[in-house]
Amino acid sequence: MPRETKRVAATLNREQIRAALAQNDPARSFYLDLETGAVVQIDENDDSPANDELRTLVMEGYGDRFRYIPGGNTSADDAAVAVWIEAEGL
């Protein structure tokens, strides 16, 4: 079964994606919002209502609207961003 193509925002914020790929803080999770092209950050140690609301929004839209960006690539560059975008089918 072919994978449906999600409509992507006109402009992905590649610098935010690169920064998210380079993150090493396990308490922070990063997701690309396909509607805005921006990266959203969730602080896993923050129990505030605003952070819980953001976490719920991301989890409800995961796969369709939001895509997880794995960190840990401290040398992430434009090529790493391009590889991630291609791997996500964007």
Image (cartoon, rainbow, N blue to C red):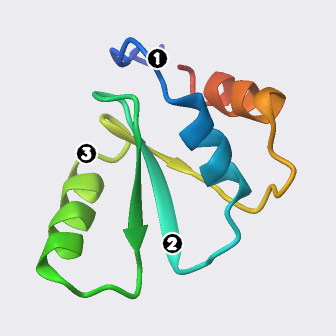
Tell me the element at label 3. loop
Q: Is residue 24 left or right of residue 45?
A: right
Please state the horizontal and vertical placement of residue 3, each as a whole percent of the image. 46, 19
- The Cα–Cα distance between marks 2 and 3, rounded to whole angstroms, is 18 Å
Q: How crowded is mark 3: few (under 14 residues within 10 Å), some or many (20 or more)?
A: some
Give the amino acid at mark 3: Gly
Give the mark toward the camera: 2 or 3: 2
Farthest front residue? Answer: 15
Farthest right residue? Answer: 75
Give the amino acid at mark 2: Arg
- Judge whether 78 appears above or below 40 on screen: above
Give the amino acid at mark 1: Met
Instruction: Return the disc, 2 or 3, that comes first in the chain's sequence.
Output: 2
Please state the horizontal and vertical placement of residue 61, each as a whole percent of the image. 25, 45
The residue wearing badge 2 is 28
The residue wearing badge 3 is 61
Q: In this view, does 24 lie to the left or right of 26?
A: right
Give the mark toward the camera: 1 or 2: 2
